[in-house]
Image (cartoon, rainbow, N blue to C red):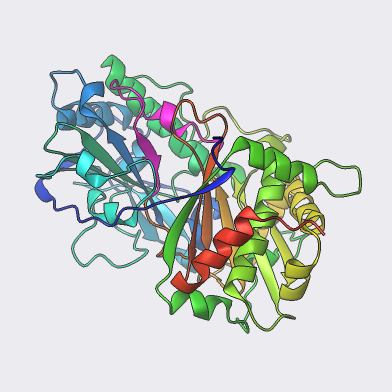
Amino acid sequence: MAPPWVQELQIPHIDIPITIDRMVPIMPAGPIPAADGDSLYLSNLDDVIGARVFTPTVYFYQLDSFNSSVPVMEMLGEALSLVLVPYYPFSGRLRETKNGKVEVFFGPEQGALMVEAHSEITLDSLGNITVPNPAWESLIFKFPNEEPYKVLEMPLLIAQVTLFKCGGFSLGLRLCHCICDGLGAMQFLSAWAATAKSGTLTTNPHPCWEREFFKPRDPPIVKFPHVEFMKIDDGSSLTMSLWKSKPVQRCYRISREFQLWLKFHAQPDDMSACSTFDAMAAHIWRSWVEALDVKPVDYTLRLTFSVNARQKLKNPPLKNGFYGNVLCLPCVTSTVSELVNDNLSKTTRLVREARNGVSEEYVKSTVDYIEVDRPRRLEFGGKLTITQWTRFSIYESADFGWGRPVYAGPIDLSPTPQVCVFLPEGATESNGSMLVCICLPENATQKFTELLCRVMMD
């Protein structure tokens, strides 16, 4: 029997008892081009409010894929110390300056942080470790009583190695989003892994900081409305129903066949092709809103999604190895009624137009908009944000010498339940399938699953 095109994946409810054994600051192994008291500029794309977070990821490695006599903690720590020389900003800290901007500064006793822990259970007892699970929270280190969204005065890289009874282990990683975007994180991770594998510093490409590339124009020139940042009073039931209901995380495997079928049937009738992402984003957004039964139906909703703008920059182009934030968040708007009742091709066209609207001028306008009216808080009003990880080489990047991880990616979306993530599937024989992770109130999950699997085109 052929597997279903859309399959809900079960997330095991488990408890992972761990013991923290030691915490080790990791300093650069050699001289760096920054002394105590120095600081580094962060662009408006780096320190926009949405980037002032840590991105937590976890990587699982089975016993049979590890054959080195060097203890994991030492191997990773030594390699990290080497790679922190060219990636020295990860060894600094963030502080706030005038007008609410943040910068990287350097002082004594900083560095990255590595934590070693162990658990008396086996990896097998965790059940399915190929599906992101909020129960893995203990595998990613947080300081006692750590404030949510705290990034100031924090280590900018925190790595926890957890050794399991079977000999397998996990690497729980927190990278500050102000320092790198997703592609930048993959570049750093690849360098760390390659260095661990070879025993000598390996960076390809060599990292480039140069955040002054995105300095605002003087005077700033804002040419677009940037609805993605707009402060909107939430007059709908959407945000209230999500944040007050203790939403649950759901994960679905979407086959390549379904993606192609959806793309074909969602094509707008204007003869301009849409991408698989355009069709999937439109379908997920519509299914989510309909499952939540958002009221009133004339309320205007927003869909934002991350777009890598590197290839848009031509005059001048970015240097190879740049690992800072080059993300824009184009925005689609629609009333509840239009989104739910119009055909999918119309919404797909709106997504395509917003994605194609990210130009070099749009990037510059975003930088200038933030300079003029710096957002002070995250705006959730009527919004779903989709983040696409399917183009990240996260499994290939995380081979430290013991092969691809069994799983590599995020764990828990529920702290920000208006975020949906598209993930690559880790299996080498995945044949182009992706994982979609999204949050809903428990009473809306069945309806969402039905809508996700049943696409109404008319």
Determine the residue positioned at 26% across, 33% down: 28
Can see residue 31?
A: yes
> Of 444 and 51, which appears nearest the observer?
444
Decide which of 18, 367 is in the foreground and name it. 18
| Image quadrant where one finds the C terminus | bottom right
Magenta stretch in the rendered image? 390-410
The N terminus - image quarter: top right
Is residue 336 located in the magenta-colored stretch of the structure? no
Q: Position of residue 318 (x, y in %)?
A: 62, 33
Left or right, 88 with respect to 62, comes to right
Q: Is residue 18 above or below residue 100?
A: above
Q: Looking at the picture, does residue 428 appear above or below residue 118?
A: above
Is residue 394 inside the magenta stretch?
yes
Image quarter of residue 97: bottom left
- Quadrant of the image occupied by residue 354: bottom right
- Would residue 176 appear left or right of 47 to someone viewing this image? left
Residue 3 drawn above or below residue 45: above
Give left or right: position of 303 versus 21: right
Residue 369 place in picture, x, y as percent: 66, 62
Tell me residue 170's x, y (percent). Answer: 25, 39
Query: Residue at 70% of width from left, 63% of height from top?
Result: 226
Q: Nearer the viewer, residue 180 or 32?
A: 180
